[in-house]
Every structure is written in C-alpha cells, then in structure tokens.
Amino acid sequence: MTTISSTLSSALILAALAGGAVGAPAVGEPAPVLVVPEIDGTRLDLAGFRGKVVIVNFWATWCVPCRAEMPALDAFYVRFHARGVELVGISVDHKRNRRTVIKAAQSVHYPVAILDDAETNGFGKPAVLPVTYIVDPRGIVRAVMTPRAAAVTEDALERAVSPLLPGEHRGP
C-alpha cells in the first residue's frame, strides 16, 4: 500500500510540474492576499506581516519532498525568527485530514494552516508541491523555490532571505 501511495504522490507531483498555478505570484510581484486560520485557530493574515520577511511554504502530508524539507524550514525558522523572519506552512491536505496535518505540524515550530480553511486565498491552489515563496518586508515576492528550480535547504533559504533583512548587506 505504501508503494502505491508513494507512486501516486510522485505521479501527482510530476503531473503538476507540467503546468502553472492560476494566480500564483511571480518574482517581483506583490504577494497575494492570504487570510487563513492556523490549525490552533489563530487568524493569520499575510498582510499583518508587513515589515518582516515572510516565507510561505505550501506542502502536503502525502508529499514526500514536502516532508523532507520541513526540518530545513524549521531549523531556519528557529535561527531567523528573532531577526524578523516569519514562516507559515500551508497544507493543501483536505479538511478531513486535519488530524494528519496536526500530527505532522507537531514536528515544527512555525505556524501551520490548511488551505481549505482559507477565508481568502490569492495564491490559488499550487500546481507544484512543495512550493515556497519568499516575501520581502514590503510584501513583494523575491523568490519562488521548488525542488526542480531551487530546492529548500537552510543555505538556500539564508541566501534568499539574508539580503532582505534590515541592516544586512544588499550587494553592489
């Protein structure tokens, strides 16, 4: 059964790589509106994070690459949260799988929400999983990371985020 689930997950991810998400923001565009309750019930409004660097990671419990990058996301969040970095994990699992999402979320320190619970979702449903957006303090998307284009690692996150932090060197 596990092999079938893994094969199906891989097939869905590969099929998604062929297309793009409707409404998915591109680098240089304003981040879309996202208002969603976290799994603990706290209301999360992406606009409320203005002035901070925000990482928005779309994932699913059944997505092997998604689960594989969660430790790197969590370690980065723990290291950089005090420096003004926010991170939110948005699960694309169905509401009926809430318990599975909650169990997976217990392994991370950052807030987690379920996309189906969103009051407003300008990102649309992602065409690729996992997909991670890096949003600068002014609310502009500065990077989009996927396993195919730019895999999420602590080093990759640091390279994308550090230049966006106040007081950091921004290059020539």
Image (cartoon, rainbow, N blue to C red):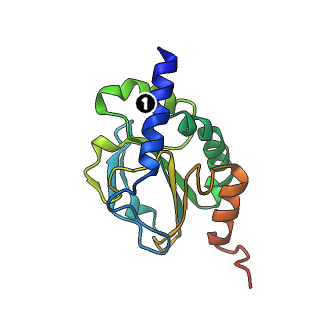
| Residue nearest the observer in this picture, 140 or 38 | 140
Q: Residue at x 70, y 50 (%)?
A: 154
146 horizontally vs 21: left or right: right
Who's the residue at 42% across and 38% down the image? Answer: 12
Q: Which residue sits at x=74%, y=85%?
A: 172
**Left or right for 10, reference 158:** left
**Element under disc 1:** helix
Q: Amino acid at mark 1?
A: Val
Badge 1: residue crowd in 10 Å (few <14, some 14–19, many ≥20):
many
Measuring from the top left, give residue 150's x and y in whole percent. Answer: 62, 56
53 lies above or below 3 = below
Vertical relation: 34 (above or below) 106: below
Place of residue 135 in the rendered image (x, y in percent of width and height, measured from the top left): 51, 65
Q: Position of residue 96 (x, y in %)?
A: 29, 27
With 22 as the anchor, is 5 left or right in this view? right
Residue to which mark 1 is pinned: 101
Measured as percent of width and height from the top left, residue 13 is found at 46, 41
* Nearer-the-camera pick, 63 or 169: 63
**Residue 129, relative to residue 48: is it above or below?**
above
Does any portion of residue 77 appear in the rendered image?
A: yes
Residue at 43%, 73% in the rendered image: 29
